[in-house]
Image (spheres, helix red, strand yellow):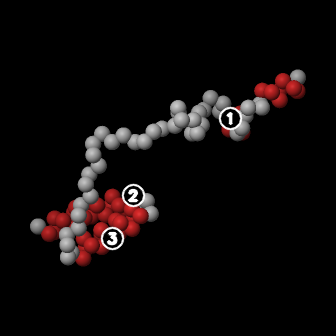
């Protein structure tokens, strides 16, 4: 009987598989999610107005945030640039 128990578990590579044997793992290409699908094009980021210190500072902050993958700050800077553009008109 001990031999049969050993064969049942010989293909188990993770303790999690003992608890959740039907859960697919992320290494399976059939069950791993693909790249996101965009229904519409992402919005074009606002351009800073040349010579404006506020626009320049927001553009630099946006570039630094994008460089480290901080997309929340990138989005915040885009919102602030759009709001600030109203002051130029």
In this image, 67 relative to 12: left or right? Answer: left
Indicate which disc, 1 or 2, sits on the residue closer to the N terminus. 1
Residue 22 position within the rendered picture, expressed as x and y whole percent measured from the top left: 62, 29
Residue 47 position within the rendered picture, expressed as x and y whole percent measured from the top left: 23, 64
- The circle drawn on residue 59 is none
Q: In this view, does 64 lie above or below 20?
A: below
> In front: 79, or 28?
28
User: Could you tell me which quadrant the N terminus lies in?
Assistant: top right
Q: Dividing the picture into quarters, in which one does residue 73 lie?
A: bottom left
Question: What residue sits 88% from the left and 27% below the top?
Answer: 2
Residue 55 position within the rendered picture, expressed as x and y whole percent measured from the top left: 24, 71
Residue tagged by mark 2? 71
Residue occupying the far front of the picture: 29
> In front: 86, or 37?
37
Residue 57 position within the rendered picture, expressed as x and y whole percent measured from the top left: 30, 73
Question: What residue sits 30% from the left and 68% below the top?
Answer: 59
Mark 1 crowd level (few <14, some 14–19, many ≥20, 10 Å Cα): some
**Tags 1 and 2 in contact by the CB under 8 Å rule?**
no
Question: What residue sits 33% from the left and 58% below the top?
Answer: 75
In this image, 89 relative to 83: left or right? Answer: left
Residue tagged by mark 3? 60
Q: Dividing the picture into quarters, in which one does residue 34 lie?
A: top left
Mark 3 crowd level (few <14, some 14–19, many ≥20, 10 Å Cα): some
Q: Distance between the residues labelled 3 and 2?
A: 14 Å
**Tags 3 and 1 in contact by the CB under 8 Å rule?**
no
Residue tagged by mark 1? 17
Indicate which disc, 3 or 1, sits on the residue closer to the N terminus. 1
Q: Is mark 3 on a helix, strand or loop?
A: helix
**Tags 3 and 2 in contact by the CB under 8 Å rule?**
no
Q: Distance between the residues labelled 1 and 2?
A: 35 Å
In this image, 11 relative to 45: left or right? Answer: right
User: Could you tell me which quadrant the C terminus lies in?
Assistant: bottom left
């Amino acid at each position: 009987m001990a031999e049969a128990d050993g064969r049942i578990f010989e293909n188990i590579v993770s303790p999690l598989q003992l608890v959740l044997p039907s859960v697919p793992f992320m290494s399976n290409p059939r069950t791993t999610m693909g790249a996101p699908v965009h229904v519409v094009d992402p919005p074009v980021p606002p351009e800073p107005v040349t010579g404006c210190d506020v626009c320049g500072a927001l553009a630099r902050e946006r570039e630094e945030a994008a460089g480290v993958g901080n997309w929340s700050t990138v989005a915040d800077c885009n919102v602030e640039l759009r709001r600030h553009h109203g002051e130029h008109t």
